Every structure is written in C-alpha cells, then in structure tokens.
Image (tube, grey):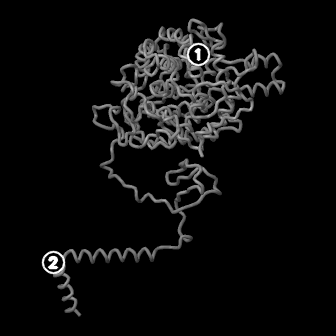
Amino acid sequence: MIQRTSRAIRFLRNTARNSPWLVIAVALHVVLLASLALVKLTSKDPEESAQGPRVVVPRVPDLPLVLPTDPEVKRFAIPDHERVELVPMSNDYLPSTPADEKPDLHKEVGTPDTPAAEFELPGGSSTIGVGPGKAHRGKPGSPFGGPGTGWGDKPRAPGGGRNGGPTKPAQDSVLAGMRWLVRHQQPNGSWSPLGMNALCTPGFPCIPADENVSANYDEGLTGLALLVFLGAGQGHDSEVTITDTAMGKEYLLGDVMTRGLKWLVDRQHDDGSFSESGFLYNEALATMAVCEAYGLSRNRYWRDPARKAVDYLVRAQRRNPKDGTPWGWRYASAERIDAEHAAGKLDDAEFAHEISDADLSATCWAVMALKSARTAHFDVPEAALRGGLAFAQSVATDDGLAGYLTRDAAGQKVGGLGEQFAYHTGTMTALDMLTRTFVEHDLADRFLEPGAKQLVKDLPSVSKDKLSVDYYYWYYATLALNQFDGPDSPRKSGKYWTPWNEAMLSAVIALQDKSTERDVCSRGGWLVDDRWSYAGHAIYNTAINTLTLEVYYRYDNAFGAKAIDKLDTRGTDSKFIATPAAALDDK
C-alpha cells in the first residue's frame, strides 16, 4: 500500500514537472465539479427560499417611473395588487473600491487650480462639473431639456460671456447653488424653513435660530427649488450625480427630483390645488414645477397632476369688473370667493370688490405657470392669458411704470414686512414687461422700451448695509431685459441688457456664501435676506438667485417663439379641462 502510494506521488511529481498545464487543467475541472455539487446539495425549492429584497415591476409598463423607497428595494408607483415579484435582488455584482483608492469628495473634479466649470465630464453630461451620468435632454417631441442649457453644451455666447451670454463664474455659481439646495432638502422631499437648521452644520445655521418661520409656504418653496433643476434640464429620471464638495457627499439628481415632485403631487387635492390655503404663489410655483416635469420627461405620472393644477389656476382667475371676463389673479381663488358669497360670508358689495381684486405680482406668476403649461403642450385657454395681459395693461403708464393694484399707484412703494429695505419702483415695471412678453410676443409693444429705460436707471447694487438688495426685482428685471434686449432677442442691441447683465452678475455672485471650510453647509447659498425673504429666507434666496443666473438658457426668446406658444383667437370655456395637444400626447 505504501509502495503504491509512493509510486502515485512520484507519478504526479513527474507529471507536474513535465506537463504543468495538464495538472492545472485537471485541478480546475475538479474545483468546478465540486462547486456544482455544492450548489445542488444546498439549493432549495423556490417556494422554500427565504424572502429577501425583491425587484418589483408592473404587469403593464404604463408607468415607467421608478420611485425609491429604501436603499435595497426599489418599487414602481403602482398599486400592490398589480405588482409582480421577480428574482431576489443582489448587490454582490457591484464593484467595490478599496478604501485607500476612494476619491476625496471634498475636492473638485480635475486639477486643484482649475475651476470645475472647465471640465466636460464623461458622456458630455455637464460643463459645470456636476458629475458623471446622463443629463436628461427631453424625449422626442418635448420642448424642454434642449440644447443651450449649459449642461453638456458650450456657452452660447462666444468667449463665455461676451455679447451678454453665460459666463464661467455664473455657471460655477449655479452649481454651488444647486449643491446648497440638495444638501438642504428635507428627508420627505420638500424644502422647508421649518426645521431646516436641523440639516445644517451644528453652530452654523443658514437661518438665524430666532427667525419666526413656518411651513405655510412649503409648496411654493419646493416648487421654486425644483424649477432650478428643471431649468438645467434635470428631471426625475436624470442620471447625473452632483458632488457636494462642502460636505463630501454625492447625490443622484433623479432621486432629488423624484422625491421633491412626489412630495408635491402627494399633497395635491381633488380640485387641483396643492396647499391647504390655496395661496396663489404656492399654487403657481407648484404648477410650474409639475408642468415642466411632465414637459421634460413626457412621463404620464406627472401628466394628470399637471392637468389638474392648470385647471385650478384657470378657475382661480378673478373677473374683470367691466364685463366679467377673465382678469388678473390674487392670493385666493375666485372659486373660494364665489363659495363665500354663496354661503353669505360676503355681501354683494364685498363680493363685487373681491371677485375683481387682482395684483400684478400674483398675475405674473400665474401667467408664467400657464406659459410653462403651454410649453409642455397643455391646451391653455386663450381668454385666461389675454385676461392676465389685460390686467397688466390696465395698471401701466406710458412712461414705463406700473402699479401693483392700479395705474394710479404706478411708481409707489408696495408695503410689506421688509419695510427696512429700499423699494425699487422698477419691480412692477419688470413684472408688467414680462407678462406682455410671454403673452403677446410683440416686440413693438410701446410699453417695453420705456420700461427698459426705467430698469437701467436702477441697476443691481449692494450697499454696505445690504438694504439695497432685492432678489425679486433682480430676477424679474433680468428675465424681462434678457427677453427684450438680450443676445437672443431680434433687437440684439444690448443697449439695456449689457449694463444690467454686468451689474446683476456682480451683485448676485458677490452675495453668495463662499465659505471654504470643510463640512460647513452654508457654502453656495444666499444667506443675506432681501425685502421678500421672510417666507423662505435662505431657501427662497438661493433658489431665486440660481434661477436668475440660469436666465441665459431658461427660456427661448418669446419674440421668436414657435407657433405653439403664440396666441390665437380661440374662445374660453367655463368648464375648461386642460389637455395635452393631441398630436403630442402619449400613446
């Protein structure tokens, strides 16, 4: 026995010396056979397998929107009875990076001395250093997410800012603002000043701890924040990863957008409103966000909420005191006023005043929301837009000024909680200009040039006490002048846009927080308040200033707009139901 064993050992030794590859091949086959036997012995019937994380898909792929629920399980937005469970999901296949090779997320992509804006990342996803992944460009037939957004495109103006186009500092500032917004999004998907400081670095609150804040404006603030990302072509299915270099974290923009949008639509009431009070600013901003989310992705999940929201805005419109036709908008909806009158809470005289009471600020926001709806191919009644235009015309003067409520108040200060701040009379002028621009598309409108002259008399500036700051005025005047006299306008003069653009960039970028300390959450936000910041403070400030800096690609020039955005002579129907244009509707 010993002799036979010795001979076998010598045979194997000689074989290994003379034919090593044969031995290796035999060994590999032995290992493979043993592995297969082990699998067979340890496998169980599928019905007896332990229940682990499972991928869930719809029976009918009608709603392709994936809504994440927890880190391991992802579910489609469909009822439980329509779910079909498939094979257990495993993360074993995911590649891992050794700890000593993981990148420092506090550092910008690229070399230490080169701004992130100079880098075009893999796949052409971003020219402003957002991160790898696919930026949403819009589905076929979508008017949103096209070229010129600054995400994967070269700046439209030659030389990165000449002729009034986007600049590298502006793009870097937009990226920093987005980073601030993603790090201050609530776990439920909203943006809210109430409890926001719980997300801040201890000892470095972005809203002073003694500020009196509430959740009354959360729907509007969430809509405003979402519009920042939508304005850059990012929807719920964006695959772009944004790296927060202040806190050393990464965020998937698709997840940020999905949670924010779903928070809004989950709050929507049967009548189409989003907030308990029906406050017009909340409704207009939430409507804009949901309409643009649908317009960008053409995903049916957002279509019905957008349609209901547009219907609500149309029904909320006040009525012209002369003939009862559609007019402007105010804080509460016309439906609520009608209901209060019917219930005896308003007498006839009070009702007659309330039903025609409108203001230029609310009207402009509503018109902008309806413009987004029309751009997303919803059928918006002509009378609603013409009513907003008629109200804007009724409060304007020949010298380019406009009143908040009436023409008699043109040029007068509008009161508010921020009385310590300087009031800029051009605010109402900018609102009036933009309403006319987006509704009528008439470059020959006699109000526009006098209005532009009024605006450049009061260029953006930052006084030592910061009381000259007015983000609301700067936002609307920037939009109005870019449309009227910017590089994409048929005028192409730059007479008014150039000085405004230079002053705006200087003022807005200078006020942005540029903290360089690690793990301090204020970096990229606008913490200095203005006259209108009391509702949202740093959230409002950061969102509206980032939108101001997106002006170069936020909207196509209305004076060269396509036929779908132009007014026609269709009448209105009191039972109007918004529907997407049939030719572009999902099949």
Residue in the image at 71% along x and 17% along y: 357
Q: Position of residue 294 (x, y in %)?
A: 57, 38
Q: Quadrant of residue 352?
A: top right
Q: Quadrant of residue 437?
A: top right
Residue in the image at 41% along x and 75% along y: 38
**Numbered circle sitting on residue 536:** none
Q: Amino acid at mark 1?
A: Asp
**Crowding near the residue tagged with mark 2, few <14, some 14–19, many ≥20 C-alpha atoms within 10 Å:** few
Residue 395 appears in the figure: yes
* Above or below, 389 relative to 282: above
For the residue labelled by badge 1, is the local secondary structure a helix, a strand or a loop? helix
**Nearer to me, 145 or 360:** 145
**Numbered circle sitting on residue 17:** 2
Residue 422 appears in the figure: no
**Nearer to me, 107 or 208:** 107
For the residue labelled by badge 2, is the local secondary structure a helix, a strand or a loop? helix
Left-right relation of 277 to 449: right
Residue in the image at 50% along x and 36% along y: 199
